Amino acid sequence: MPAPPYERRKTARRRKLFALRLDEWLLTRLRHVALDFKRQSNRVLEDAIRRWLAEQAALGNADQVSLLQGHAGGRLPTLQEVEKQHIARVLSKTGGNASEASRILDINRRTLVRKMERYGLEPARVKKRKKG
């Protein structure tokens, strides 16, 4: 004999509440896992950079080591500092040609222009073509 309609609605509500609670619990767990992963990956990346810097210093590659060494007390530079230096170096190699630099950096040209504006790098001059 099937359950009365009220009992079916009550059971459906319980299932829905259970599913919502389960979803909230899963989202919370996923957030914790993501934060743990981020912390661990940052640690691994920092250790790899330190090892690479030590190897490069031992080999005498001062130009590569100076790129990643910080300004004060041997601290590691931020990703933004390294990115700014790298973009500036690529732009100087391409003579300020943003299109060529974006191909080398493997990013969209508009993204490169935005990063140049954000970091205060001199934007490439765009020459207007004359129609006619």
Image: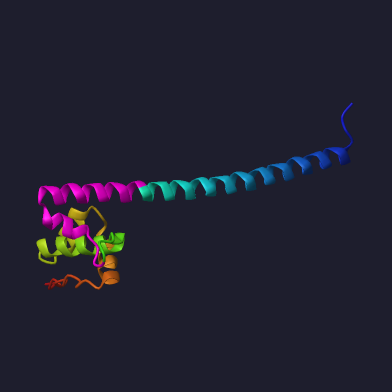
Magenta residue check for 68: yes
**Left/right of residue 74 with respect to residue 16 in the rendered view:** left
Image quarter in which the N terminus is found: top right
Q: Residue at x 30, y 63 (%)?
A: 80
For residue 75, side relative to residue 40 (left or right): left
The answer to whether 98 is drawn above or below residue 30 in the figure is below
Magenta stretch secondary structure, dominant = helix
Quarter of the figure that contains the C terminus: bottom left
Q: Nearer the viewer, residue 54 or 116?
A: 54
The quarter of the displayed image where residue 62 is located? bottom left
91 left or right of 16 in image: left
Q: Nearer the viewer, residue 101 or 82?
A: 82
Q: Residue furthest top?
A: 1
Taking the spot 13% from the left edge, 67% from the top edge, the residue there is 96
Q: Residue 77 lies in what quarter of the image?
A: bottom left
Between 38 and 43, the one nearer to me in the picture: 43
Q: Position of residue 108 (x, y in %)?
A: 26, 57
| Residue 82 picture location, percent across and down | 25, 60
Q: Tell me which segment is drawn in magenta.
A: 44-72
Can residue 4 be found in the magenta stretch?
Answer: no
